[in-house]
Image (cartoon, grey):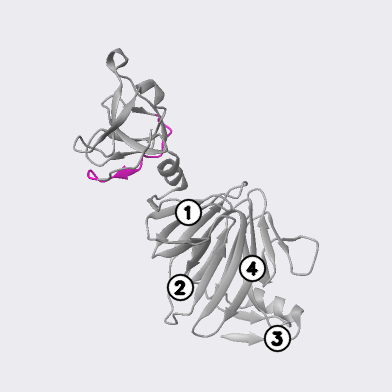
Amino acid sequence: MIIRLRDWGLLFALCLLLPLTVVAQTPEGQYAAALTVSQPGVEVLHVNTTNWIGVKVESVVGVGDSIRTAGAGRAQINYVADSNVTTLLPDTIYRITRFDVTAESYAIEADLQVGFTEHRLPAVADSDATYVLTTPGMTLSSVGTQFTARVEDNGRSAVLSREGSLTATSGDQSVEVPAGFGVRASAGGTLSDVVAARTYAELDAALDGCTVTLTTPDDVSLNVRSGPNISFDLIGYSSASDISTLMGRNESGNWYRIKFGDGFGWVLSSTAAVDKGCAGLRQFADDYGPETAAP
């Protein structure tokens, strides 16, 4: 159901009284969504205005409006019925840039400037339905999925797909991110590998590696191979004391991926002690490789 009203005050009142399955239209012809505060600390900067306005319970928001959640503030935006929900977690700034809706489809675009968001999007028959979220590091396109997005203060952006699959794009790069996987990119940078991760701690550990302590008897050097078994080529040697970070391990043994030269290599160790704060090393198939690394 879509209603068209000329009086903004009446629109605001109706949006507070009617169920969240109603989508209303502003006097300017843009559709408005329902914003609901779940934890205090939510403000709105309406389009063509200069002052942030605190929201205690509910409000309406539309194209050009920005929402920020300070401190413990938390809010939900219902775009199309109760099944299309964007949740803004604390310390988030989010701006709506497009909102078009029909009885069968929708086109929603928004910018996540900083913070954390959760998204639940309904599957629709119309293949043209889109939800596009732009971050400093990547653009995310999704329909009929559930995902979360994170933007750090430095603009580094990340996404975790919870259900369904979404597309992440940065420049000429474009990758599919299936459920249970995530991807990351620095502001203006390139996309990382798509890696298995359920939390952002797991995503960061998979991409940044984990701190480790390695030892060998009598300071014997470790063989570095291009893959995680002895059938791969020997590409060099490394002292155990020079290895402070592990970038992954194989599925079935004690082979560990390390940074080596301008790429990666693999070492065999039974003494690797990974820091307890590590959320989990990235796992690779036992036949993964060969790596490309120039000492």
Q: Which of the pair 68/196 is nearer the observer?
A: 196
Instruction: Identify the mark nearer the N-term, 2 or 4.
Output: 4
Name the residue that disc number 3 marks.
5
Q: Which mark is residue 191?
A: 1
Q: Residue at x 28, y 38 (%)?
A: 226
Say what secondary structure mark 4 lies in: strand
Residue 7's spot in the image, x, y percent? 76, 83
Q: Amino acid at mark 3?
A: Leu
Say what secondary structure mark 2 lies in: loop
Q: CA distance from mark 3 to mark 1?
A: 44 Å
Name the residue that disc number 4 marks.
96
Q: Amino acid at mark 1?
A: Leu
Q: Amino acid at mark 2?
A: Pro
Is residue 266 covered in magenta?
no
Say what secondary structure mark 3 lies in: loop
Name the residue that disc number 2 marks.
122
Q: Nearer the viewer, mark 2 or mark 4?
A: 4
